[in-house]
Image (cartoon, rainbow, N blue to C red):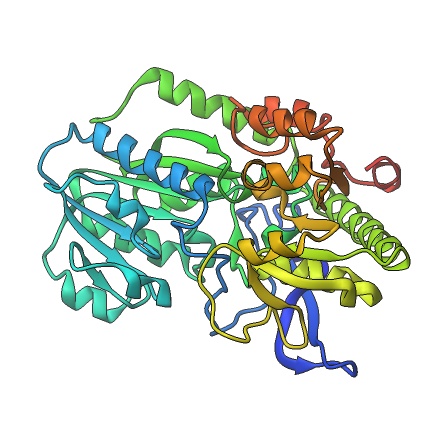
Amino acid sequence: MTPAFALEGAVNGGARKGLLGRAKSEAAEFVLCDPARDVHACGLLQSATLTDAPPKRSAPSGIYRTTRSSLRAMATEGLELISGRDCAALDIGCSDGTLLSFYPRWVERFGVDPSDDIDGVGAWTWTAKTAFPGPEIDRAFAGKKFDLITAASTLEEVDEPRAFLARVKSLLTCDGVFCLETLYAPMALTHTAADTFAGGLSAVYSLTVLERLLRDCELKVFRGALTEKDGGSIRLFITHADSAEYDFDPWYERLAQLWDEENALGLRSIQPYQAFAARAADIRRNFAEKIAEFSKCNQSVHLYGAGPGAAMLHSWAGAGADIIEAAVVAEAFGDGARLCAGGPSLVSETESRAVNPDWLIAPASLKREVLERWREYVLQGGKVLFVTPDVHAVNAGNYAVEFGKSLAGAEGGGGADSLRSILKAAGGLRVVGGKEARKSA
């Protein structure tokens, strides 16, 4: 393993507090299974530390339109592939059951998730509050097979991906389909999406690494596409390696294009990760300077979200973090809840709009949605600050231009047909290493 990068302030220390009573933030360290040191290495980008604590998710899957749209597409496309027959479907990491709710009633639905989000799923589907794979699932599904299995934003939380994929294979019918959507390393690096790596992820995958893992488990990818979920993900449709049921040349040609574009980034070398870390450090410094300016001008600031990414931005604000008065959330929360120990209190969107802060700091992964939901706020004089891929503000004067970029997918996966078009919209290849690259990043 070769150290790839360390993102300062990306891991919240929870109960650990600093001298000012704030939660201490630590670095998120990632390592590369480095092909330069071992020809048999797979090139996986993974966390340098293992933890028994489950990753903290940003919100239940039904909260944001971006997530709902992606999950609806997964359910619809999966059903189309198996010809809409009577079937059994399993959603791994089902959260609040949003994806399962998009299936018609004649689909036999099953959901598995270790988080408390699953408690809100009704009696219309079978659920288990447990990790996958695990002994409880083995007992419950003894002899059971599924025509369609889905897993969105789940594989990146798994410490043993081969065991995960092998168990999925054992549960698939002979012509079953496994739909996998996971964070996509090339897009996270290209967009300098530092918040992607916050929250205790085990690994972030490229298509090359996924194909190797699937091949080892006697599975194969037959269709794939990039999506805007979580700021940049890849959606793959997978079946048994010996099945020819879904062999279709145009789908394989599309996959070959993605492979070629990914290989052009040179992600099997260490330089792209070092360049990413250098750009992230620049962003952190620029963001802290911006917060200091707000503090000097006595301006009020709210932070959008209560997940790991929001906690990371609060840490990145540095000495001026106290100017952030509240963390704005769209989901329900308990009385007295805070973003982190010593951090801002959580408030609803309605409460935030009533206060009408001068600035709203928001995640780039939700740029389109935030600009839609906060349109009136911006047009009436409010300003939204996005931190990645570079620190930039949206106000009434540039709202139309910035909203147009979000619709076109210029800063996310949505609307882009290929990795090449995403890179072009982002200003070209920026995941290159060396001193000169750091200067130009």
Q: Residue at x 27, y 32 (%)?
A: 76
Name the image quarter holding the C terminus.
top right
| In-image side of 271 versus 162 (left or right) | right
Name the image quarter holding the N terminus.
bottom right
| In-image side of 315 versus 365 (left or right) | right
Q: Is residue 243 visible?
A: no
Q: Is residue 431 above or below residue 424?
A: below
Q: Nearer the viewer, residue 368 or 352?
A: 352
Residue 152 position, x and y percent, is 39, 47
Residue 311 position, x and y percent, is 64, 63
Q: Residue at x 30, y 68 (%)?
A: 130
Q: Is residue 349 above or below residue 174?
A: below
Residue 313 position, x and y percent, is 69, 58
Q: Quadrant of residue 385?
A: top right
Q: Is residue 174 visible?
A: yes
Q: Nearer the viewer, residue 230 or 7?
A: 230
Q: Quadrant of residue 73?
A: top left
Q: Is residue 328 above or below residue 439?
A: below
Q: Is residue 264 above or below residue 313?
A: above
Q: Quadrant of residue 132?
A: bottom left
The count of marks equals: 0
Q: Residue at x 61, y 38 (%)?
A: 376
Check the image and name the residue furthest to the top.
250
| In-image side of 393 versus 416 (left or right) | right
| In-image side of 435 versus 31 (left or right) | right
Residue 436 position, x and y percent, is 88, 37
Q: Nearer the viewer, residue 35 or 316?
A: 316
Q: Nearer the viewer, residue 219 or 92?
A: 92
